[in-house]
Amino acid sequence: MDACPGLDCACRPLPLDPEGVTPAQTAVDFLRFAVLLAALAGLALCGRFAAGRLVYGSCFAAAFAALVWSVRHVPANRPRGRITAIILTLAVLIRLLFFWAWPADSDINRYIVEGNMQSAAGNPYQLAPGDPAVLPLLSPTGRELLSRVNHPELSAAYPPLAELVCRLTAFVSPTPAAFKTVALLADLVACLLLVRILAARCLPPVWLAFFALNPLTLAMGVGEGHLDALVALAVVLALGAFDRRRDGWGFFWLGVAGMVKYPALLLIPFFWRRGNVARTVWCLLPLACFWPYREAGGDVFRSLTVFAGYVSHGGPLTAVFQPLLGGLAPAVSLAIGATILAVGWLAVQDRLRGGLWAMVTVLACLPTVYPWYWLVVVPFWLLRPGWPVLWLLAGQGLATAPTWLRGSGLGGEGTAMAAVWLPFALLLILALRRPTFVAKLQAFGPVRTLSVIVPTRNEQVVIGRCLGSLLGTGVAEVVVADGGSGDATGALAKGQGARVVVADGGRGGQIAAALRHCRGDVVLVLHADAVLAPDVPTRIVRALNAWPQVAGGVVGMRFDVPGQGLFLLTRLNALRSVAMGIGFGDQGQFFRREALAAAGGFPNMALMEDVEVSLRLRSVGETISLGGGIVVSGRRWAGPGFGGKAVGVIRLFLIYLAGRRLGLADPTGWWYYKRYYGRPPHHTAV
């Protein structure tokens, strides 16, 4: 498999039906989309006829169900051009229906008033709509809408680019229809860009429907006219730029997104990688949008902080802490969010997972969350359509009442919020154990044979037990990667039928050299002081064939001696591999050779090669943990200083992750080797 240049995925061209698509098949595909179109039309008409909460919520859920059903049942081998044309045509038609049928949100009243006052040289960060000085600055339309502005006592809280868009749009036409037109055009441009991104990533063209025909995008974008549609467009532009290795432009567009809605700025560090950190300066260019409002000074952020201080709605974490902490709940929620973001920044180092992690974390921890905030998530989810985020998007029909019902309350409190977030948490836990997606994609081919690599150096005491555990397990071959042993390790390995490959370069160099002699579809790296359960090879092959999107993972381990410290270490190892997808070598790492080639090969590193190969595999597919099957010697943890050893491992692990993210990591691994073993290379067993 060849990797798509610059992408976070392995790119396998989608197979086409050699006999072509018959008219009957085309008709069936059209009927599938017709079901979706009917469901979306029903949702749009809810707005036209001001349906009640129950009808609205049911139609919202039905539209998402129809979306998933349609995408899952359109074969991936349909001609890209034909499917794309159908989806784009339907996208235009259904947006026109939502434009006509769905009432604009009350936020547009503020858009118009703030944009209108700027035409008369008013500064929206210094003048609140309720200020008497505002009235003379407004046009007749602005004056008419002034009484409908929410929170008129607060000046503008939106970022400056959002205010400039309001100014330009209100200058052209100070009407709700004008702002809905801006959202409509932003959506359609994003759809066209996503066509190119899907093709570049060799993803099914039908996935375009996840954005183009998404009920949330339609209702909150062109329907209610929220400026978040511009944030989604900027994110799509950024993704396209990063895919083409134009990282400067990618950071620029992320900066643009943040100047429309501030939370999008948190995406920027998740797009750092080796060689591009300096290009982050491009994200500073959109800061020029502050210049027209420079007279406001710190007042630019005044209403934002005030709003965050006393308005709280829809934020699940804040809602949990509110009964206990009262006014401190938002601050505690944001602090927890910052911690989770920091962990994700270190551990989730591919762009799509990182973007999803960042935005879902932000929206879970913000005190106030409305459905239109989720539009920034949709482009990331489209390229990684998992079930947990789908539930969050579809659940927004419960989270807040539609605009025509908000006079009776915002909705989304209590039971409704629990119905959105508790199933998400459950689905997320299940997805961490076994990755599943809304739409299936054959990422890797089937596997049949498994090779085992055992890295060694002076392991004559334990090598016999290790290799003995492989007998009768169905392993195709065993390759001992020896680092220049001065004892009988090599002779003992040959005596048990293993091929011995002598190499230097530390453990990673040894494994990389041994890989050149392996013929199996799958490779398992087993440390010399470990014993393998007889069913593990069969379980690995079965799991990889059951989940073709999985690139590799870990078997899972326990120590051969008891002890509370070792038990805790085992649990932490398991948690890290499941939650972060990062395995350590003593857990029994395995990978498809096809996936490893797509990820750039095995890292030739003296140490940290296990962390690096995990991150590389995560860039082209999923990783899993099989739950156990390896027993490892506790010899390295014997003696005094257990706590210091554990802290040392964690410290090096975090240093490597941070260095890798910032492009400062030692690619040879020798720096980490010397600090882990405390002595020069080749004087300590690997």
Image (spheres, grey):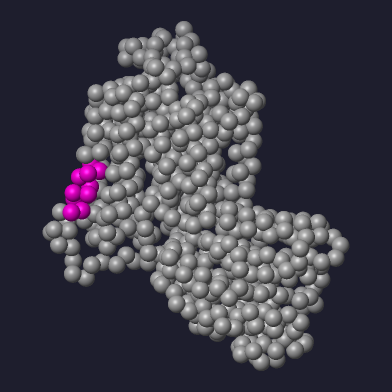
Numbered disc total: 0
Q: Residue at x 49, y 57 (%)?
A: 434
Hey, which residue is sitting farthest right in the picture? 640
Between residue 159 and residue 347, name the one nearer to us.
347
Residue 404 in view:
yes
Predominant SS of the magenta segment: helix
Task: Name the side, left or right, on which 244 lies relative to 497.
Answer: left
Q: Position of residue 603 (x, y in %)?
A: 60, 71
Q: Position of residue 447 (x, y in %)?
A: 44, 74
Does 625 sit above or below residue 252?
Answer: below
Does 662 sit above or below residue 442?
Answer: above
Judge whether residue 85 is colored magenta. Answer: no
Hey, which residue is sitting farthest left in the picture? 23
Q: Residue at x 47, y 63 (%)?
A: 550
Q: Position of residue 294 (x, y in %)?
A: 54, 26
Highlighted range, magenta: 28-37
Q: Residue at x 55, y 73 (%)?
A: 535
Between residue 428 and residue 292, name the one nearer to us.
428
Q: Residue at x 75, y 89 (%)?
A: 488
Q: Position of residue 523 (x, y in %)?
A: 54, 75
Residue 5 in view:
no
Task: Name the side, left or right, on which 43 lies relative to 285.
Answer: left
Q: Quadrant of residue 588?
A: bottom right
